[in-house]
Image (spheres, helix red, strand yellow):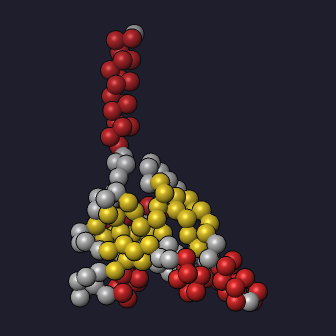
């Protein structure tokens, strides 16, 4: 009996361990399908800049800005076309398409079926908070919230 079960257990555990890769290949992902399949559209070296707290306080948005030294990749292309950027196993997710304000958020965990990241509140919520006035409104709008994507990010 154990001679039959042992090969099955070994086979099953190897399928589970190799069924999912835990890291994303470096590169630019232009849509969620590429992100789900872990197949970047292309690989280029973009510069990731951590935004200052003063910059975030004044104009809002998420923590990371991505720039390119290549003339053909401008700011508009980065903010509107790129869904995610991966560099050295670090995933930066563009929050603008999901109405979580502009710029990129750092994904804290990309293991298994979950992706977690910390981003600003939605633009609609930030506009509602703006009625509190300058300093208070921008402070509340810049507050970060944790988000968790489960398997539906694959669709």
Instruction: Let me know if residue 151 appears in the view.
Output: no
Q: Is residue 17 above or below residue 43?
A: above
Residue lying furthest right in this view?
Answer: 132
Q: How many marks?
A: 0
Q: Quadrant of the N terminus?
A: top left
| Front residue (pair 68, 26) | 68
> Residue 45: x percent and y percent?
25, 71
Q: Residue at x 31, y 87 (%)?
A: 74
Quarter assignment of residue 71: bottom left
Quarter assignment of residue 101: bottom right
Instruction: Let me know if residue 46 appears in the view.
Output: yes
| Front residue (pair 152, 107) | 107
Q: Residue at x 67, y 79 (%)?
A: 139
Q: Residue at x 40, y 74 (%)?
A: 49
Q: Is residue 16 above or below residue 29?
A: above
> Residue 138: x percent and y percent?
66, 83
> Residue 69: x percent and y percent?
25, 82
Q: Quadrant of the C terminus?
A: bottom left
> Residue 96: x percent and y percent?
49, 79
Q: Is residue 95 left or right of residue 89?
A: right
Q: Is residue 60 left or right of residue 28?
A: right
Q: Residue at x 31, y 70 (%)?
A: 28
């Amino acid at each position: 009996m154990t001679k039959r079960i042992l090969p099955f257990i070994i086979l099953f555990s190897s399928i589970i361990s190799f069924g999912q890769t835990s890291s994303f290949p470096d590169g630019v992902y232009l849509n969620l399908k590429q992100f789900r399949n872990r197949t970047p559209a292309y690989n280029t070296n973009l510069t990731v800049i951590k935004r200052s707290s003063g910059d975030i306080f004044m104009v809002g948005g998420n923590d990371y800005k991505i720039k390119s030294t290549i003339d053909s990749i401008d700011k508009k292309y980065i903010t509107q076309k790129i869904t995610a950027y991966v560099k050295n196993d670090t995933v930066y997710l563009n929050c603008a398409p999901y109405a979580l304000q502009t710029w990129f958020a750092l994904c804290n965990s990309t293991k298994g079926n979950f992706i977690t990241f910390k981003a600003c509140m939605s633009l609609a919520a930030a506009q509602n908070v703006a009625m509190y006035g300058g300093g208070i409104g921008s402070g509340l709008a810049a507050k970060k919230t944790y988000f968790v994507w489960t398997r539906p990010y694959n669709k």
